[in-house]
Image (cartoon, coloured by chain):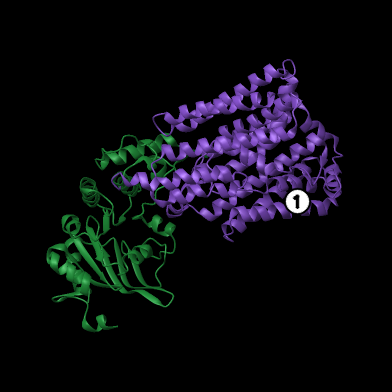
């Protein structure tokens, strides 16, 4: 059902960064993901929408290697891959910016950006080069809200923390950046900053998956929209083929006009 | 009368200096300010010592005695600092010192040492410490046992095992070379003090200049973030306890040299002394923050305090009281700095702030008062716009 829709995207931008085919995932007796197909392209923002419990978080945790998929195929830049741990994902260039912001409060901005992948000179840490690289990355993203890269993360605002988390993805030249509700807890001005940042991220060639509940955000930055309904992909289409009402219908009922899940899919 | 005069000045000055550090502009200034406070406290203690026991306190031999006493517990405290920064606690250090010292002085080990070299005894002590630390680490990281319980069990078991091996007898170190090397001195500085200095320096480099240290802070500060950043948190935790065990092994060697014996009563209550030194050194019991310099200063403060008390012919009971008071004051100050310097963030802080009371155990008063301000926080942060 999603195959013809995928073709629209393919003709537009060439080889996808990530392609999921027929992915399933269960937790015990509960099947959370059913036969999920999803395609993510470089330089494009894909908005992943769906109601609470639709499987968005499970899907990204699968991609991040935290809860590996049970079955189905995952292709990354045209190659079959397996994602069994966060390390696998990181090695491929998949970076996830989590909703609760996986930053260590007691470390500073540079230390957080390099956490787990510190630069070394011999056995010792190379603080100088890490600081320079962090500063350059933030400048590249036109981030001007941080006073110092040696500030502790605990002293940053929500928007600044998002910025640091996103900058970390850029620093590692991640090919695929997944943002889990990055604007959920932010004020108007901070949301604006983060959305701008997301756009710049895609313009710099990264493939971006952007999870959100906010339709305004979707139509503001997304190039494509993928709607999940009860663990199935109801639609995965370019943004200009849908309007806001259709997206909301896809989220709430899994169907909208000729888009969406077939009647038998909806039944079981 | 003189008890109060000796006990109060250091505490008062520590308060003043640490407050100054807390008011500093950035949080990075915090540790420096706190260490400065400790230096001032130590200096005040020295002045008190010099005034109350002139001639006896200010004496090269006396200073060397203080340093020699500080060396053994200091080495243990360096290991403890890593464990606590990494979010754990190691109550078994005293028992591990005893077990290492016994194992390294058994007839079999000493016979091997005689045939080969006394280095066999050193290696045995360190390996036994490391092995017991490994058990601690595996039980905690993979068995998911709370560190407090796991190391409490090791405390009981390791000392029991030491008693069994030694059959409750004190084992004499026979090797002359061993005693001469470790109990000797280099250019007037006792070897034990040099070992302490080397361990502290190595600990400082490891904590501040290597990925191991950086990851220790990350694991103690936010284990989930560390895991998502690709750090193998469980493996790292195991290494922290192994490190603590190795420090216990080194301390056992030092103690064997100082007392020329291995004994199952060695290192009794070292866990409390080490935790106290680490805590007044500014390391947070909830993990994620701490310094080696602070720990070294903490050890020196406690050892100097004991020395001043002894020189003034005060009972060890009075010492214990003074120690308790200092620990509570230091922890109270630390809580102020921790909650005052950092904005309250979600419930994690409230939950965490209550935790240090548990491992400390000895300080119910301190943890209760700490719970007060932490509990009040949601109220006053409610006034601010949520972030």
Q: Which chain is purple?
A: B
* Vertical side of B241 occupied by B74: above or below: above
Q: Position of residue B384 (x, y in %)?
A: 30, 44
Q: Residue at x 44, y 57 (%)?
A: A87
Q: Is residue A102 left or right of residue A221?
A: right
Label 1 belongs to which residue? B159
Q: Position of residue B191 (x, y in %)?
A: 73, 29
Q: Is residue B342 left or right of residue B196?
A: left
* Vertical side of B28 occupied by A172: above or below: below
Q: Residue at x 70, y 17 (%)?
A: B58
Q: Nearer the viewer, residue A211 or A176?
A: A211
Q: Residue at x 54, y 45 (%)?
A: B367
Q: Which chain is green?
A: A
Q: Nearer the viewer, residue A107 or B120?
A: A107
* Vertical side of A168 occupied by A96: above or below: below
Residue that sits furthest to the top in the current view: B55
Q: Residue at x 68, y 18 (%)?
A: B50
Q: Is residue B131 left or right of residue A109?
A: right
């Amino acid at each position: 059902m999603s195959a013809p829709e995928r073709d629209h995207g393919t003709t537009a931008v060439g080889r996808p960064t990530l392609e999921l085919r027929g992915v399933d995932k269960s937790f015990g007796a509960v099947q959370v993901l059913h036969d999920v197909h999803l395609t993510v392209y470089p330089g494009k923002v894909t908005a992943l929408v769906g109601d609470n419990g639709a499987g968005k978080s499970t899907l990204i945790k699968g991609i991040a290697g935290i809860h590996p998929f049970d079955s189905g195929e995952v292709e990354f830049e045209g190659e079959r891959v397996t994602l069994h741990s966060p390390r696998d994902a990181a090695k491929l260039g998949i970076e996830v910016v989590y909703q609760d912001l996986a930053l260590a409060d007691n470390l500073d901005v540079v230390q957080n950006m390099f956490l787990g992948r510190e630069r070394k000179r011999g056995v010792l840490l190379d603080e100088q080069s890490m600081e320079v690289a962090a500063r350059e990355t933030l400048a590249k993203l036109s981030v001007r809200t941080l006073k110092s890269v040696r500030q502790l993360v605990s002293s940053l605002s929500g928007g600044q923390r998002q910025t640091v988390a996103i900058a970390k993805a850029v620093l590692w030249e991640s090919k695929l950046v997944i943002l889990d509700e990055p604007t959920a807890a932010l004020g108007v001005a901070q949301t604006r900053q983060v959305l701008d940042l997301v756009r710049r991220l895609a313009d710099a060639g990264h493939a971006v998956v952007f999870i959100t509940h906010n339709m305004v955000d979707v139509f503001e930055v997304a190039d494509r929209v993928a709607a999940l309904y009860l663990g199935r992909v109801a639609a995965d289409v370019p943004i200009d083929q849908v309007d806001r009402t259709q997206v909301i219908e896809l989220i709430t009922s899994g169907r909208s006009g000729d888009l969406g899940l077939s009647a038998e899919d909806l039944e079981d | 009368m003189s008890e109060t005069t000796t006990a109060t000045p250091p505490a008062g000055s520590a308060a003043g200096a640490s407050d100054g550090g807390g008011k500093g502009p950035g949080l990075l200034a915090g540790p420096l300010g706190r260490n400065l406070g400790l230096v001032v406290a130590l200096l005040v203690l020295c002045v008190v010592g010099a005034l109350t026991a002139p001639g006896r306190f200010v004496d090269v031999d006396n200073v060397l005695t203080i340093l020699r006493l500080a060396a053994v517990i200091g080495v243990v405290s360096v290991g403890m600092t890593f464990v606590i920064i990494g979010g754990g606690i190691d109550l078994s250090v005293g028992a591990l010192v005893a077990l290492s010292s016994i194992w390294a002085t058994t007839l079999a080990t000493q016979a091997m040492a005689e045939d080969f070299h006394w280095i066999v005894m050193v290696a045995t002590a360190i390996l036994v410490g490391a092995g017991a630390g490994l058990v601690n680490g595996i039980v905690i990281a993979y068995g998911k046992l709370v560190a407090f319980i796991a190391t409490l069990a090791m405390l009981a078991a390791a000392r029991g095992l030491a008693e069994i091996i030694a059959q409750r007898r004190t084992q004499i170190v026979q090797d002359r070379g061993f005693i001469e090397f470790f109990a000797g001195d280099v250019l007037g500085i006792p070897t034990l003090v040099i070992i302490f200095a080397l361990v502290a320096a190595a600990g400082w480099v490891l904590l501040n200049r290597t990925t191991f240290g950086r990851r220790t802070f990350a694991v103690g500060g936010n284990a989930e973030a560390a895991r998502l950043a690709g750090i193998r948190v469980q493996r790292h935790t195991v290494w922290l306890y192994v490190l603590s065990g190795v420090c216990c092994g080194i301390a056992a060697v030092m103690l064997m040299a100082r007392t020329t014996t291995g004994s199952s009563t060695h290192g009794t209550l070292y866990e409390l002394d080490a935790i106290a030194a680490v805590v007044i050194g500014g390391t947070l019991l909830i993990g994620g923050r701490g310094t080696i310099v602070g720990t070294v200063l903490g050890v020196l403060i406690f050892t100097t305090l004991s020395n001043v008390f002894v020189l003034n012919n005060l009972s060890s009971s009075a010492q214990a009281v003074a120690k308790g008071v200092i620990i509570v004051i230091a922890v109270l100050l630390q809580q102020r700095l921790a909650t005052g310097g950092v904005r309250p963030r979600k419930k994690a802080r409230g939950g965490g702030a209550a935790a240090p009371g548990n491992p400390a155990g000895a300080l119910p008063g301190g943890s209760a008062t700490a719970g007060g301000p932490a509990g009040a926080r949601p109220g006053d942060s409610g006034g601010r716009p949520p972030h």
